[in-house]
Image: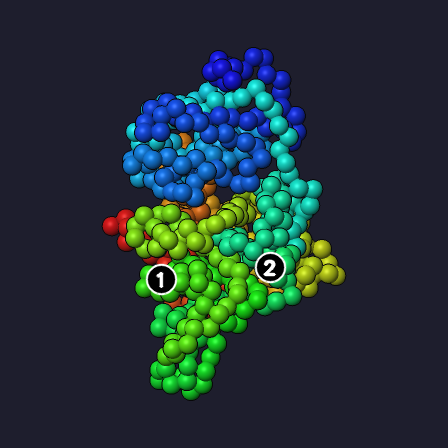
Amino acid sequence: MPHDELSTLHHPRPLLAGEARSFQLAVLEGPDRDATFELAPSSPGRILVGTSASCAVRLTDRKISRRHAAFEFVGPELRLSDLGSTNGTFVNQTRILGIVLEQPTQVRMGNTVLEVRPRDEIKRVPLSEASSFARVIGGSAAMRRLYPLCERLAASTVPVLIEGETGTGKELLAEALHEAGPRAAEPFVVFDCAAVAPNLIESQLFGHERGAFTGASSVRRGVFEQAHGGTLFVDEIGDLDLSLQPRLLRAIERGEVCRVGGERWHAVDVRILAATRRDLDTEVQNGRFREDLFYRLAVTRIELPPLRNRHGDIGRLARHFWSTLGGLDIPLPYESFERYDAYAWPGNVRELKNAVLRRLALGELADVGYDEATQDEALQAEGLDQILALDLPLPEARHRVTEALERRYLARVLERHGGDVGKAAAASGIARRYFNLLRARHREESIAER
């Protein structure tokens, strides 16, 4: 198609519900000059741009990060977001965090100039009619776009890397993929890299022989052998110690394990599903994750959206949790719906579930601490006006406000309970493990800012 037809839309008709315009991405300057990529509304989730082989738009410019930016169709809109790249993403000489693209637009990343060109071609956005996939519940467009991909992944036996923020339901999706697949009758075994002491991980993964170390009084099969014939779900794979990653890679590639203290290799037949809250492309780039293991795990990948981007799902999930957790006799109070809809849910679906459970257990007392005036006062103290003055896109402004609220909330609830993490987590209505993850994340950010 000639350039003029791509870059100029001649009296385009308004888009109808469920429709979106296709785009072409053309490289005008840089090492990949003259390359073109299609940006189709049918893409499930984000279309990643970067130098990593896992990116749909893969570029060779060394000034571009492994996972530099992402395009995403949200309804009829095409959005471009920078993914915390080293050298930034620029539109009209302005560094951007996120922007909606409608007209022909030039974007600069590193030494590369890209032009995003809307096509005259209009397509129906393929969304599943389902409001769930197995036990994964969600009728939002963000979730229904994923269900056809989930069905294809469930029918296969290839490794899948499930990405997403903490609490988005990665383990639940992994279990759903197993239950809907050909290995459903076989074991589904979970290994959480973040929940096992570093000195025990090797034994947990591969098993040990009797006498292999102090306390090894009997033979123990590792999770690979336990999952034989079925599925092994490796949660928080990004937290696995670098020294153990070669052994994990060998086990996956060769289909055999050797127990700690043993000499014999045991054949295993497992499907590998892995999940991470981390950006593994960045972890590879920083030398904290092996590139060969990353490519072996990311044969296919799926990214779960955060709850704040799943429009309409908060109420649906809240009602589901209310009924399944014991609230069958009375409806979920309307004021709870209002509070839930107004909250950003940094802990995602897991935090919402815990909030509903707390409301069931404590009644109106559960809302103490969620008063709007209290929230507003806390945010003002963290500089809400200064954040608003930055004129950031809504997702980034919301993220900064949420981060500020989290920091103050964690400090306050810990102080109120004398530093007792267990009591603080219970009072917060979130799991202790998630509470500790939040603390660790904010601690790392504080150190980085010094």
- For the point 64% across and 39% down, the residue is 127
Q: Earlier in the sequence, mark 1 or mark 2?
A: 2
- For the point 47% across and 60% down, the residue is 235
In this image, 207 relative to 168: left or right?
Answer: left
| Residue 138: image tag | none
Q: Position of residue 85 (x, y in %)?
A: 34, 39
- Is 403 in front, or is 235? 235
The residue carrying pointer 1 sits among few (fewer than 14), some (14 to 19) or many (20 or more) residues within 10 Å by Cα, namely few
- For the point 62% across and 44% down, the residue is 148
Circle 1 sits in a helix, a strand or a loop, which is it?
A: helix
**Residue receiving disc 2:** 178
- Is 304 in front, or is 329? 304
Say how many tags the image has. Answer: 2
Q: Mark 1–mark 2 contact, CB under 8 Å? A: no
- Is 225 in front, or is 43? 225
The residue carrying pointer 2 sits among few (fewer than 14), some (14 to 19) or many (20 or more) residues within 10 Å by Cα, namely many
- For the point 39% across and 78% down, the residue is 262
| Residue 246: image tag | 1
Q: Is residue 278 above or below residue 215?
A: above
In this image, 373 relative to 245: left or right?
Answer: right
Give the quadrant of residue 230: bottom right
From this viewpoint, which residue is outermost toward the right? 329
**Of the residues shown, which amino acid type is indicated by label 1?**
Pro
**Mark pair 1, 2: CA separation:** 26 Å
- Is 26 in front, or is 317? 26
Q: Position of residue 114 (x, y in %)?
A: 39, 26
Circle 2 sits in a helix, a strand or a loop, which is it?
A: helix
